[in-house]
């Protein structure tokens, strides 16, 4: 995959909106014209019309170069600092497709599994139970970013193999965290969705390389990051031409101490207003306490989240990490029923 | 009302749990014994048994003084810094009764109205509309705590009269903010629930005087206050013998700038776990943007809140304060339908 | 003292700048003109010229009403939300005089003493020691705002008498916290500077009543208050005609847990840039740990603070509050030497 | 360089304290014994005695294996979560030597230069001026981590060459930020100190690889990272056997908006108490406003910082990044005089 032309120090961008009646040939001519000027076109094909994004510096992107082309309805600037992530670029919700699951559509997607992969048995048992309860994506960490160098750092590649095997046996997709560009080949081989964790949300090199890997990306909000920064980090991925980005609220750092982080449920309606990307919630890391997870999961769905990612462990008391916030499979069953009820009463499903 | 005996520098408290078979005479003897030692007894009569709280310093409260009394099952210490507010003191949910409304029970209570009372017409119209949509308490500020001394400070007593009149005409109770002890007599005359605002959550003198006024109190969490501090401020009111306290989450201050404050929806399950007091949510002040209010209101109810307090203005564009976050009556109608649906699917009603 | 004319809902203000040659009669005529229009004039007499502030709503303050008057050089608007507190209103530093001490001038003022008044002996001993080390103001709380209703609430009026007696015996001024308007008469009788604590920074009723009491006010920044909000709270006091306000940085609430609060030393240069009011630092409450107090005190003075307020206790181990952050008298001696050295090397003295 | 033995999931560590009279042979025997058990020994040779750190899991590190060895005085556990970074491991201050400069000793080190390398002329001019004013390390970014993918990302390797050339011509060392492991070879070739920026403080992979590169590391505190987390990130580097780590406070994220970040000057005394590593301050990034930089620089030195890192640009108005917070060379001259005065009055020098 070729890296995109990245214009130096630009803060403007344009959208070329094609007429509803524009032909494929007309659209192709516009794309050629954009590439001819040294830009990379970003295409968003909606139901009614196609729009094409051009990112450049003000000096270089001259709207008049496109306004006269056949099939072009109008050329409009994107004023937000994030461009491809904005609702201005794409008005319809993005739906990310992963092995037949549609993330960002009417149905709410639930990702579940242990914090860390510890053994084949642990993952197999968890996968079976969360699948039975209605989850469609299996989560689990093979490479763990730990605050202390002396804490368990994950099983590495064998952990990925265990995840893949358990997912395949239970018709689940796999989401797992990537913490280093060196691990991309193994990730691409075994995972369906690559997760960028909170601590790496502004590891821009990782964002770009993961973007180029072409797989859907789950981008978690940093503990210290504003929603605008989250969208700008998404923009790093989108600007590589990888448009399959899922945003995730997982709690921010505040003075309050009863919860591990403060679950910023407002992030859901704000992000849905500003961006077309799917938004999911991680109540487990925000709460840090399994007793609070069901209430926060319900709140996230009620606020309009497109999905949830939940930590489930067959025996939380012996978990190698995050045991205190992991649900048992039985608790997860109960949660899924509650979440399903909330989803239905706002016109969605699980 | 006599102020309670306030022991100097105590951090311990006891609960005397009476037997289920204890007679009124036995309970009376325990109360006499407590008062004889110079303490004020706090009684909580549950369905199965009565418990009596004694707050004192470690030196003074000697459990053996009560353990032998007739009808006493056991004497246990309360270890939390808040005592009467804790679940340890009272396991059953407190239900605050206000003119026939039950706050803290199965039904979710919605309080609605303008930020500030501006005119009779404004309040009358709002009252009629919110009542029709299902609200049972009318909110509105007659005395406004404003960051700037040059901002509109409220209509004062005439504002209280307007609120009372509109509430009576529409079968609503009145909640309104009190910002000074001097205003207590007028407040007691016209209001049903006295609100302590976020900026006064640690105005301990006001807490005590409002507690002694005997009316139910709506206590808002300070923008900078931990949940433990909120419960300790509630304790100031409870310790005057006024047990009708409603807690309110209204957003805390963080680095995020898209919302006026960060709506800490986790406060709901945390407070319900730690305390028996009713908990409501104020999505309007947290969001600062009416577009976000419905999502946050739904999230609060889904998380288990006992009610909502919502700003509604017949014409937000001309509101003297908080216009940007006020719903129109039509938007409030739509919100009530959504909230009702969420409430029902978790076994509650509006 | 008559309360000021408080215009409803204004966000503008004007400054009438008198010519350097203006006579007292001309200035008097301007003042009469302002009062005749129903405003309260606020006078700031600098070395070269007098300026007069008028706070009103845009509708009411018409610059042309003053521009033609004899002795008037020009009329200019104050655009900041705080008016009388701004450098625009008064360019020279305000010096607050308290029993011959000048706070805000070249010399750095140190206020020291225990968190709470506990006994005559404790205060006498502390006063003697801090005076010998170079402090000129005695601090100590007689009325304590405590998070818990069961914590030591202060000795009350007898505590004020103890402070006054110890101060008089050692040629010290007295600063002490006021937490309720009911206590104003006793405060005015015994104290020289009335302190508004962090939790009451937005208790606007208290601000106004303390302002009207006419004594110098030490206004502490709230734990979650912006600097703009601090200046607006100062404005509440200034707008009563009481111009003797001292601002105090005492730490804000953040996620960091090693310190009780985060000492925002940037507040010093920011406040000195925006306002003419004196700024002092309270490293004791920020640190919460006596080992850190000297470094933070030095940092405050190096950043340009006009003074310090420090907790000193003859025997911190038995202090009724804040023992962990109180210096011993010997530690305070050492601190004063360090602070004096820093002050001298930036052209100031202690 | 061989990666260290990293024990899985350990939270304990031991220090073997050698007798003052221990011979090199005895110390060698202890090291062999440690390696024989599969651990990597970490040696700290103080003036009076040598201590050897062993990091392992509780199960594996058995103190009795070392207590009986010749020359061993005692074996004591390190209880803090960070081990090699703790004062318990090493009581004497660490001094990092870089081209003859001693960072962490009596003399305060000043690093200065532009935010980003923009041209040879810009860097040459800045280098000359900051050297003349007393700086001994040249800063400047060749690889810039930018929030937006469309902002200037730095000159890359040519930028490194420019820095090296200007530094060599002016007898300066070079510190520059590394944002990706791919850049390590170029960094090692051109830079003297490798900077880990705030956004990468928990990019653990980068920490380890930079640690292994063997060059001194300047580790900046994350905007929302606790001091304990900063020390744990330092531990990632130290545990590779690279003991030349310099910590840097650069402001944390809070609700206050007048400054870009809140300069947590308390970090200086806290870190000096907890750790033996040198601590410097970056007032430029904290302030975000050049008017505030001198006050914050003075405050940092007064609080005990071992150095400063300051942004200086020959023409801030045209800077490609951070112009608002860059000092002019003349302002830097004035700052160095102030800082020198403060340093001397606390027994240090610049």
Image: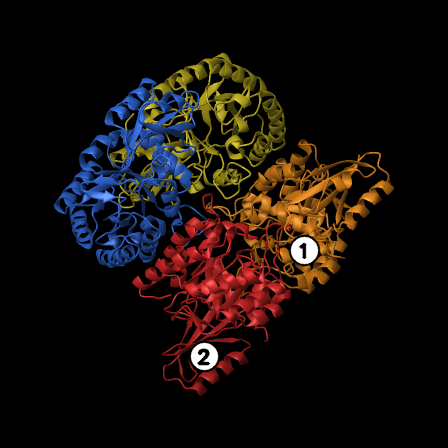
Chain colours: A yellow, B orange, C red, D blue
Q: Is residue D19 above or below residue C176?
A: above
User: Where does the image place residue C132, in percent across and percent down from the top left?
Assistant: 43, 65
State the image quarter where residue B63 is shown. top right
- Label 1 near label 2: C-beta < 8 Å? no
Q: CA distance from mark 2 to mark 1?
A: 49 Å
The answer to whether residue D81 is left or right of residue B331 is: left
State the image quarter where residue A203 is shown. top left
Mark 2 surroundings within 10 Å by alpha-carbon count, few (fewer than 14), some (14 through 19), many (20 or more): some
State the image quarter where residue B199 is shown. bottom right
User: Where does the image place residue A183, in percent across and percent down from the top left?
Assistant: 34, 22
The answer to whether residue B231 is left or right of residue D256 is: right
The dot on residue B208 is: 1
- Tell me, yes or no, whether dots 2 and 1 are on the same chain: no
Report the chain holding disc 1: B
The dot on residue C70 is: none
Q: Nearer the viewer, mark 2 or mark 1?
A: 1
Q: Is residue B49 above or below residue C180?
A: above
Q: Which residue is mark 2?
A: C66
Q: Secondary structure at mark 1?
A: helix
Nearer to us in this view, C112 or C248: C112
Residue for point 39% across, 41% down: D274
Q: Is residue C82 visible?
A: no
**Quadrant of image for the C terminus of chain C:** bottom left
Nearer to us in this view, B82 or A12: B82
User: Where does the image place residue B116, in percent across and percent down from the top left?
Assistant: 62, 58
**Quadrant of image for the N terminus of chain C:** bottom right
User: Where does the image place residue B231, in percent across and percent down from the top left?
Assistant: 63, 45
Q: Is residue A349 above or below residue D134?
A: above
Q: Secondary structure at mark 2?
A: helix
Nearer to us in this view, B323 or A290: A290
């Amino acid at each position: 995959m070729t890296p995109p032309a990245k214009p130096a120090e630009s803060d403007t961008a344009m959208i070329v909106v094609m007429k509803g009646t524009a032909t494929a040939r007309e659209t192709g001519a516009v794309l050629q014209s954009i590439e001819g000027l040294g830009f990379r076109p970003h295409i968003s094909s909606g139901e009614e019309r196609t729009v094409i994004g051009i990112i450049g510096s003000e000096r270089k992107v001259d709207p008049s170069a496109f306004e006269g082309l056949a099939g072009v309805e109008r050329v409009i600037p994107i004023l937000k600092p994030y461009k491809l992530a904005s609702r201005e670029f794409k008005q319809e919700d993005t739906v990310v497709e992963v092995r037949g699951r549609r993330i960002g559509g009417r149905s709410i997607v639930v990702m579940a599994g242990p914090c860390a992969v510890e053994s084949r048995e642990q993952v197999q048992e968890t996968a079976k139970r969360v699948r039975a309860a209605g989850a469609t994506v299996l989560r689990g960490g093979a490479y763990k970013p730990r605050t202390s160098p002396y804490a368990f750092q994950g099983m590495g590649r064998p952990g990925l193999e265990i995840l893949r095997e358990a997912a395949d046996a239970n018709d689940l997709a796999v989401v797992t965290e990537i913490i280093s560009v060196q691990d991309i080949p193994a990730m691409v081989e075994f995972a369906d969705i690559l997760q960028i964790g909170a601590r790496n949300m502004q590891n821009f090199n990782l964002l770009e390389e993961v973007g180029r890997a072409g797989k859907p990306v789950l981008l978690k909000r940093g503990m210290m990051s504003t929603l605008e920064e989250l969208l700008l980090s998404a923009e790093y991925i989108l600007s590589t031409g990888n448009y399959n980005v899922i945003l995730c609220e997982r709690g921010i750092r505040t003075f309050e101490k009863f919860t591990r982080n403060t679950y910023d449920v407002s992030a859901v309606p704000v992000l849905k207003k500003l961006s077309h990307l799917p938004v999911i919630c991680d109540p487990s890391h925000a709460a840090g306490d399994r007793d609070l997870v069901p209430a926060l999961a319900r709140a996230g769905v009620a606020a309009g989240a497109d999905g949830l990612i939940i930590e489930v462990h067959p025996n939380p008391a012996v978990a190698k990490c995050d045991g205190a916030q992991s649900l048992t499979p039985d608790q997860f069953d109960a949660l899924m029923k509650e979440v399903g009820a909330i989803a239905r009463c706002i016109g969605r499903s699980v």
